[in-house]
Amino acid sequence: MILPIVAYGAAILRKVSEPINADYPNLSGLIADMWETMYESNGIGLAAPQINKNIRLFVVDSTQIFANAEPEDEKYPDAPGIKKAFINPTIVELSGKEWAYNEGCLSIPKIREDVTRHETVTLQYMDEKFVSHTDTFNGMTARVILHEYDHIEGKLFIDYVKPLRRKMLQGKLNDINKGKVRVDYKMIQIK
């Protein structure tokens, strides 16, 4: 089932999400709905707060980045990417150089800004079967993971933007908050 994406301005996007256990109701159905919603919205990652669930869960499919790359596009070490659900993740280590890349977000449509992030992240998490993993990710995959991880920590990519630039974006952010933005996917405003 395709779920609506929560628009910028909703309080849930600023809350630290709660961990879940294997008894979480219909978890496999929720994850399937998240994949369907993400693909329908042309996303490469989706966190539970973006579908109005205050839980520590996100999905990432960085394979799309590489599948849709042009030959002249920059090469990244994590090709061909991953497709994975992350439950109750915690960052073990951030490493590598920091690099900037132009990011966007389904909850903040039509705004893209350069965000600087570490090139490598080591993450401890559970998969859909609640099997524990500790894995290291780099390149674009690490970037997408860190973007989605921020969502379960109540952070948004615009929090990394310099104050003056953020002030310049405020009119567009207000429009998103008021529902004055057109998107090709289901979106809801929650106060």
Image (spheres, rainbow, N blue to C red):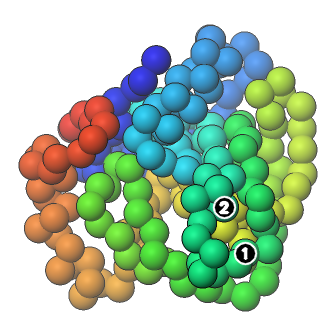
What numbered label is drawn on residue 66?
Answer: 2
Q: Is residue 191 or residue 101 the one in the foreground?
A: 101
Residue 32 horizontal/vertical position (percent): 60, 23
Given the image, on which type of amino acid does mark 2 rest? Phe
Depicted 140 relative to depicted 5: above or below: below
Instruction: Name the residue: 77% across, 27% down.
Output: 128
Res 158 quadrant in image: bottom left
Q: Is residue 172 or residue 183 the one in the foreground?
A: 183
Q: Earlier in the sequence, mark 2 or mark 1?
A: 2
Residue 139 horizontal/vertical position (percent): 72, 72
Q: Nearer the viewer, mark 2 or mark 1?
A: 2
Say whether residue 91 is visible: no
Q: Which residue is mark 1?
A: 76
Given the image, on which type of amino acid does mark 1 rest? Tyr
Under circle 1, the secondary element is loop
Crowd band around label 1 with a 10 angstrom C-alpha radius: few (<14), some (14–19), many (20+): few
Say whether residue 148 is visible: yes
Q: Are marks 2 and 1 in contact (CB under 8 Å)?
A: yes
Residue 78 horizontal/vertical position (percent): 78, 66
